[in-house]
Amino acid sequence: MSKKIDQFKIAVVGATGNVGRTMLSVLAERGFPIQNIQAVASDKSIGRQVSYGEEGVLTVQGLSNFDFSKCQIALFSPGGKVSAEYAPKAATAGCVVIDNTSHFRMDEDVPLIVPEVNLDALKDYRKRNIIANPNCSTIQLVMALKPLHDISPIKRIVVSTYQSVSGAGKEGLDELYEQSRGIFVNDPMEPKKFSKPIAFNVIPHIDHFLDCGDTKEEWKMSVETKKILDSKIELTATCVRVPVFVGHAVSANIEFESDINIAEANKKLRNFPGLRVIDNPDDYQYVTPVETAGEDAVFVSRIRQDKTIPHGLSLWIVADNVRKGAALNAVQIAEHLIKDFLDCNKTLAA
């Protein structure tokens, strides 16, 4: 005998990292229907405690022996190599994996989802029982592109990103803090996580360089945008690490197939779920990364025509990369999964 599940058994893998901890926080904040939640990380973290909600505390379990057959959904953010090994094992055990790493994103049998943009693709999750979370900068970019692409198809985008050190994990945060402190006490700056000093500097290098001269981060933005939004869109990117703790910014110059009216574009952006338009240069109303920390929305500012091309707009797009760029997007995917699929199709023995 079986019964419909009203509450779900969840695992968060990589629970001791920046994104994993934020996933736990977002699940609690949004009242996700949880019967049981497990914090999972590498075996060296066994026994550590992590927060869940305002008062909850979870004891970390080791990944190597974790039984995924006891969970319906697992939110993964343990690093690409770990996901490559353990996500298929979890999926085979009957647990739906929502993976925040880059490993499965371009797998044609794995949907790459931003719920506000391409939720219809979620139905394909059954092919592998794995769903991919896009790159943090890609998420905030396609959120702003989607309502404009609906007005007039996008032909080409030129992107420059300004990405905070939290995108490189705890080591990135620690390096910016230590180097910033070191400047004032005259300590030597020795890069470890980054290729150059990050304090009071910018580094045009995120992820490794490819043979074509792009970095993998720049490649990700192009191929992920095509997979999520439209395969015909051409995109070139320059991705830059900046000395900001949390919050990514994207400058996007967009060329459309036909004329696009500023007033209509502004209205579409304002009415799109998950976007907030704050754009009044006369009163210095535009959003900077520090203002997005802890926020769920993607913010759009500096909306203006590009008169150097026939049909062009320029935008400034900012978001908390750890929340909407990672943890929140994964939780939103899980929410739609249980609403549209698992609440009807996933059962446990009574």
Image: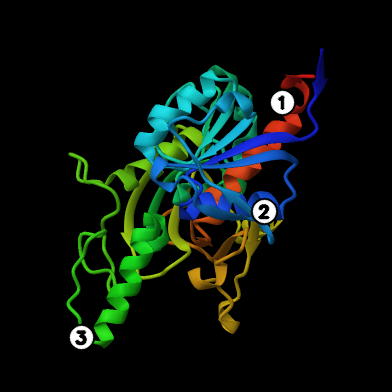
In this view, 279 is above or below 54: below
For disc 1, the marked residue is 341
| Residue 273 shows in this picture | no
- Element marked by disc 2: helix
Callout in the foreground (2, 1): 1
Could you tell me how far apart the alpha carbons at marks 2 and 3 are, in whole angstroms? 50 Å
- Residue type highlighted by circle 1: Phe
Whichever of labels 2 and 1 marks the residue nearer the N terminus, that label is 2
CA neighbours of label 1 inside 10 A, class few (<14), some (14 to 19), many (20+)? few
Q: Which mark is residue 186?
A: 3
- Residue type highlighted by circle 3: Asn
- Element marked by disc 1: helix
Of residues 113 and 260, the one nearer the viewer is: 113
CA neighbours of label 3 inside 10 A, class few (<14), some (14 to 19), many (20+)? few
- Tell me the quarter of the image containing the N terminus: top right
Query: Position of 286 compared to 239: left or right?
Result: right
Residue 37, image x and y in percent?
65, 41
Residue 234, image x and y in percent?
39, 40
The residue drawn where x is 43% and y is 68% is 245
Name which quarter of the figure residue 105 lies in.
Answer: top left
Query: Position of 17 compared to 345: left or right?
Result: left
Whichever of labels 2 and 3 marks the residue nearer the N terminus, that label is 3
| Residue 192 shows in this picture | yes
In this view, 20 is above or below 97: below
Whichever of labels 3 and 1 marks the residue nearer the N terminus, that label is 3
- Residue type highlighted by circle 2: Lys
For disc 2, the marked residue is 268
